[in-house]
């Protein structure tokens, strides 16, 4: 009887143990699937990037309007046209000024003719005075005749000088008339492409009032020289110098990166946004002749401050805020928090000076739910 009771207790105990083990197995924490990265040597660049989107700009861009108001009489250049320096882009009605210029040109011609007449008379009078002076020395001419001839020669010479001065006055009037006519012509200040034309033949245009921006009559762009402007946070700006290499990415070319060089760092801080003050930099594009860039493209700039080659590196996203990484154990599949000493870093890679060795595997997907120290995990294939 006693042995039967002991047997029942043993069976009950074994049953309880089996139930506890089964319950623990069913409710055990299941490994979390994580992405791992194997630590290896490589290149790390310390860099800073723009805080807001940059812009591709042309070295030369002219948003032009006529110097005076008037009615458009001609539009030789249309949008998209390639023009040369000095080409007429827009012409206002100017028949009155052309007539005024023609009048001054005729006046100049008349002044030249009068000058020729006056100077020819002066030349004859001078020769006559010399002849009488020669005769007077031989006693063949009176003193009175000589005085008259000399006075006439001087007067004729003065008339010649006055006529020449009138020619110069006429030429000055012609220059004034030509300048007035030029004010009705809008010429290209450099070779470029016409980006925009505001106006049609027959419409009236007026100059932009002071302090009031208005659309330009013609927008001319020189696409042979382009650069990128980008705002850099004021904290990062002191480390940037002209001549530093930079990497440029464009939304228009999402699969390509381009190289460039910092050519200017603004000597002042923009405070358009009080909580995000920035310094503007300009980056010259290196492969400009190989691209078909357009002014106005959005661009991002990454300025390279320092380059470290053949150093241990990990993806920057795998480093936690307290300078630790989650190390994967091949033995038990549990994560271990490992403190590391960080070196040069950018948004892509961070240098590891100590705390890891080549071949270690760390968690890349640190933002997944439940991923932390001591948690069993399963690597993704």
Image: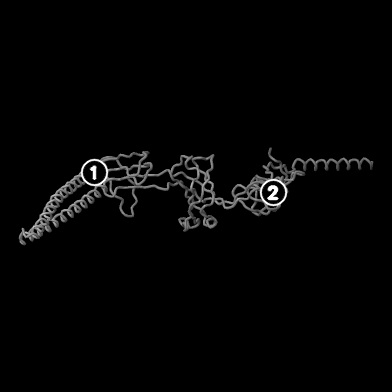
Residue plotted at (33% across, 49% down) = 214
Residue 285 is situated, as x and y percent measured from the top left of the image, at 49, 46
Q: Nearer the viewer, residue 30 or 36?
A: 36
Q: Nearer the viewer, residue 327 or 195?
A: 195
Q: Secondary structure at mark 1?
A: loop
Which tag, 1 or 2, sits closer to the chain's start?
1
In the picture as drawn, the residue positioned furthest to the top comes out as 381
Q: In the displayed structure, does residue 232 sit left or right of residue 85?
A: right
Q: Secondary structure at mark 2?
A: strand
Image quarter hosting the N terminus:
top right
Are the residues tagged 1 and 2 within 8 Å (C-beta)?
no
Q: Nearer the viewer, residue 379 or 73?
A: 73
Image quarter hosting the C terminus:
top right
Residue plotted at (69% across, 41% down) = 33
Q: How would you rate the neighbour count of disc 1 (Cα within 10 Å): few for under 14, some for 14-19, many for 20 or more?
A: some
Name the disc covering residue 22, or none. none
**Residue underneath mark 2:** 326
Residue 152 is situated, as x and y percent measured from the top left of the image, at 9, 57
Residue 335 is situated, as x and y percent measured from the top left of the image, at 72, 47
Residue plotted at (45% across, 56% down) = 272
Residue plotted at (50% across, 51% down) = 262
**Residue underneath mark 1:** 93
Q: How would you rate the neighbour count of disc 2 (Cα within 10 Å): few for under 14, some for 14-19, many for 20 or more?
A: many
Residue 230 is situated, as x and y percent measured from the top left of the image, at 49, 50
Q: In the displayed structure, does residue 265 sit left or right of residue 379?
A: left
Q: In the displayed structure, does residue 42 sit left or right of residue 155?
A: right
Q: Nearer the viewer, residue 117 or 377?
A: 117
Disc 1 and disc 2: Cα gap in Å? Answer: 77 Å
Q: Which marked residue is nearer to the observer: mark 1 or mark 2?
A: 1
């Amino acid at each position: 009887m006693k042995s039967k009771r002991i047997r029942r207790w043993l069976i009950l105990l074994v049953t309880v143990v089996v139930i506890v083990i089964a319950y623990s197995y069913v409710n055990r924490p299941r490994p979390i699937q994580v992405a791992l990265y194997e630590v290896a040597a490589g290149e790390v660049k310390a860099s800073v990037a723009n805080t807001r989107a940059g812009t591709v700009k042309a070295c030369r861009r002219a948003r032009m309007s006529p110097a005076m108001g008037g009615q458009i009489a001609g539009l030789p250049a249309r949008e998209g046209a390639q023009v040369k320096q000095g080409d007429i882009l827009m012409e206002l009605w100017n028949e009155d000024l052309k007539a005024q210029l023609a009048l001054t040109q005729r006046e100049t011609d008349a002044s030249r003719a009068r000058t020729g007449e006056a100077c020819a008379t002066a030349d004859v009078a001078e020769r006559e005075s010399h002849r009488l002076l020669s005769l007077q020395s031989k006693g063949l001419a009176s003193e009175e005749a000589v005085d008259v001839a000399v006075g006439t020669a001087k007067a004729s010479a003065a008339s010649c000088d006055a006529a020449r001065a009138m020619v110069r006055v006429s030429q000055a009037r012609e220059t004034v008339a030509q300048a007035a006519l030029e004010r009705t012509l809008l010429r290209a200040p450099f070779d470029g492409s016409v980006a925009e034309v505001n106006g049609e033949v027959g419409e009236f245009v007026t100059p932009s009032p002071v302090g009031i921006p208005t659309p330009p009559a013609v927008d001319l762009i020189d696409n042979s020289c382009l650069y990128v402007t980008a705002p850099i946070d004021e904290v990062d700006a002191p480390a940037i110098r002209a001549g530093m290499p930079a990497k440029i990415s464009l939304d228009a070319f999402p699969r390509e990166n381009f190289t460039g060089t910092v050519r200017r760092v603004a000597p002042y801080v923009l405070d358009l946004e009080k909580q995000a003050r920035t310094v503007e930099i300009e980056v010259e594009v290196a492969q400009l002749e190989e691209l078909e860039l357009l002014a106005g493209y959005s661009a991002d700039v990454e300025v390279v401050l320092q380059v470290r080659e053949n150093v241990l590196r990990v993806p920057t996203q795998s480093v936690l805020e307290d300078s630790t990484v989650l190390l994967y154990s091949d033995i038990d599949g549990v994560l271990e928090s490992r403190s590391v000493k960080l070196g040069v870093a950018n948004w892509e890679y961070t240098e590891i000076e100590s705390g890891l060795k080549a071949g270690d595997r760390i968690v890349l997907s640190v933002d997944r739910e439940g991923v932390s120290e001591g948690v069993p995990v399963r690597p993704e294939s």
